[in-house]
Amino acid sequence: MRPANILHLGVKELRSLVRDPIMLVLIVYAFTLSVYTAATAMPETLNKAPIAVVNEDRSPLSWRIVSAFYPPYFVPPEMIDQAQMDARMDAGLDTFALDIPPNFQRDLLAGRRPTIQLNVDATRMSQAFTGSGYIQAIVTDEVRSFAQRYREVPELPVDLALRVRFNPQLDKSWFGAIMQVINNVTMLSIVLTGAALIREREHGTIEHLLVMPVTPLEIMTSKVWAMGLVVLAATAFALTAVVQGWLSVPIQGSLALFLAGAALHLFATTSMGIFLGTVARSMPQFALLLMLVLLPLQMLSGGSTPRESMPEAVQYIMLAAPNTHFVMLAQAILYRGAGFTAVWPQFLAIAAIGSVLFALALARFRRSLATMA
């Protein structure tokens, strides 16, 4: 293997990428707008949910409850009557409709247990599931604080002191931005290397390489370092300019240590992309194959759902995937500020998995070139 050949072939790959506007747009979008969208539009976050209130009591307590709904979680409540409630929800104007019954305050102060009706438009599932819990907590807090001024309320025997580590404000944008970058590293590295190989086959340039004094190892290595370098540079830009700069999301650990782990991960995923590129015979086949590979990798790696909540069999199977270990080391470094002594097992696992994937991809690549010769 001659380093000069690998260098020149890698430069050729970079020039081919520069002449592909669609891939350039994909790279720019994946590490800018995609990261911003994932951070600011997390589906679990309640944001400006429309709510209407039927205030049949019109007491100080009922107006106190109404005033407790304010942005950014809710829009200012729309005051309606009972006849309008169902019609507005059928028209999709309100996600929540709160009906405060007559004599609500009087019954509460008399020691009774009055009820408030909450109607929820469950077709807006993300807001409906989260918002109902928000509304229940808001109403409970307002009623309790109001009642404490008039009669004795038993204190809880235990006072729970809650301390949140690493994300004190429970800001979901911190999670969404960084995890989107991590997922895009895996996605783009596979797409770029696989597409580069298929593009050469479709354009007929792979035959030109066969008559040149280069080996399959040199061809494959050049694609790995060239596409890996592009994704690594885009990752560094996304973390510094988009995550830290644009979104003001703090990064606790060493960015250099994370990029070292990302480079090792790219060695594994670019090899996987070349392997998939040798299996698919055309770009449409490659796109379908990506759907079967990327979705399980990203959904079961621990980036979307904690691995501990998955079945044990799935947890053990996904240990064979490189991005499972990459998610573990990325979260440890970027969220918790972990050093190399804490994440070296993940580095070692990614290196071992990457070596296996590189060997499999090289064997498959050699066989595919032999059929063309």
Image (cartoon, rainbow, N blue to C red):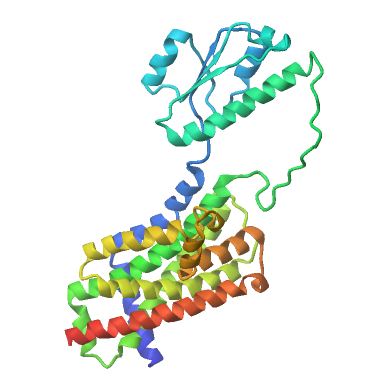
Image quadrant where residue 160 sits: top right
On the image, the x and y values in percent for residue 292 come to 32, 61
Could you tell whether 171 is left or right of 313 in the image? right
* Numbered circles on residues, count: 0
Residue drawn at x 59%, y 24% is 69
On the image, the x and y values in percent for residue 146 come to 73, 17
User: In the rendered image, which quarter contains the N terminus?
Assistant: bottom left
Residue drawn at x 25%, y 84% is 367
Residue drawn at x 49%, y 11% is 80
In this rendering, is residue 291 above or below 359?
Answer: above
On the image, the x and y values in percent for residue 25 come to 34, 58
Residue drawn at x 41%, y 21% is 93
In this rendering, is residue 264 above or below 28?
Answer: below
On the image, the x and y values in percent for residue 40 come to 50, 44
In this rendering, is residue 31 above or below 195?
Answer: above
Most foreground residue, 198 or 10: 198
Let me know if residue 134 appears in the view: yes
Let me know if residue 227 appears in the view: no
Could you tell whether 298 is left or right of 344 in the image? left
Image quadrant where residue 328 sits: bottom right
Image quadrant where residue 291 sits: bottom left
User: In the rendered image, which quarter contains the C terminus?
Assistant: bottom left
Could you tell whether 242 is left or right of 254 in the image? left
